[in-house]
Image: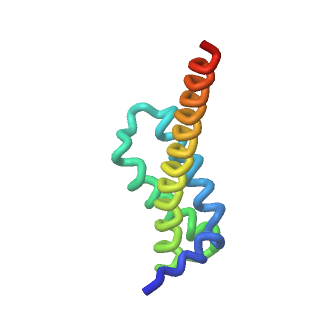
Amino acid sequence: MSIDLSFISDYAIVVLACLALGYILKNWIKDVDNKYIPTILCIVGAITGCIAKGTISLENIVYGAIAGLASTGMHQVFKQMIENKKETNVEVEKANEKEIK
């Protein structure tokens, strides 16, 4: 059984909008607990999906909600990539310092 996620490309604007909103909620609005961000993005994604497609339907609601949640996953992937790059750079700097000594 395979899952077809090709619809995500149709909802790229929803993913990007939710990604931006999630970033704002996490970094600039301190009153929002992190555990609520995926739920907020799911709801906003459902609404934005309907707006982007120009009609309210179950399909647009569900795909928009999934796109909103996908933005949460994208944030985590980017965050881990950046942290991994920082750790790698620190390790390289430490190795260079040992070679110099």
Give x and y (percent) for residue 81: 56, 45
Residue farthest to the top, as pictured: 101
User: Which image quarter is the C terminus in?
Assistant: top right
Q: Is residue 66 above or below residue 17?
A: below
What residue do we see at 52% from left, 68% from top?
Answer: 64
Tell me: 1 left or right of 97: left
Q: Nearer the viewer, residue 69 or 94?
A: 94
Number of marks in picture: 0
Tell me: 2 left or right of 54: left
Q: Is residue 70 above or below residue 62?
A: above
The image quarter containing residue 97 is top right
User: Which image quarter is the N terminus in?
Assistant: bottom left
The image quarter containing residue 90 is top right
What residue do we see at 65% from left, 72% from top?
Answer: 10
What residue do we see at 41% from left, 53% from top?
Answer: 38
Give x and y (percent) for residue 84: 53, 40
What residue do we see at 50% from left, 61% from top?
Answer: 70
In this figure, which colouring scheme has been used for the structure?
Answer: rainbow
Q: Is residue 67 above or below residue 71?
A: below
The image quarter containing residue 5 is bottom right
Give x and y (percent) for residue 4: 53, 80
Q: Nearer the viewer, residue 7 or 2?
A: 2
Q: Nearer the viewer, residue 55 or 79?
A: 79
Give x and y (percent) for residue 44: 49, 58
Tell me: 81 left or right of 41: right
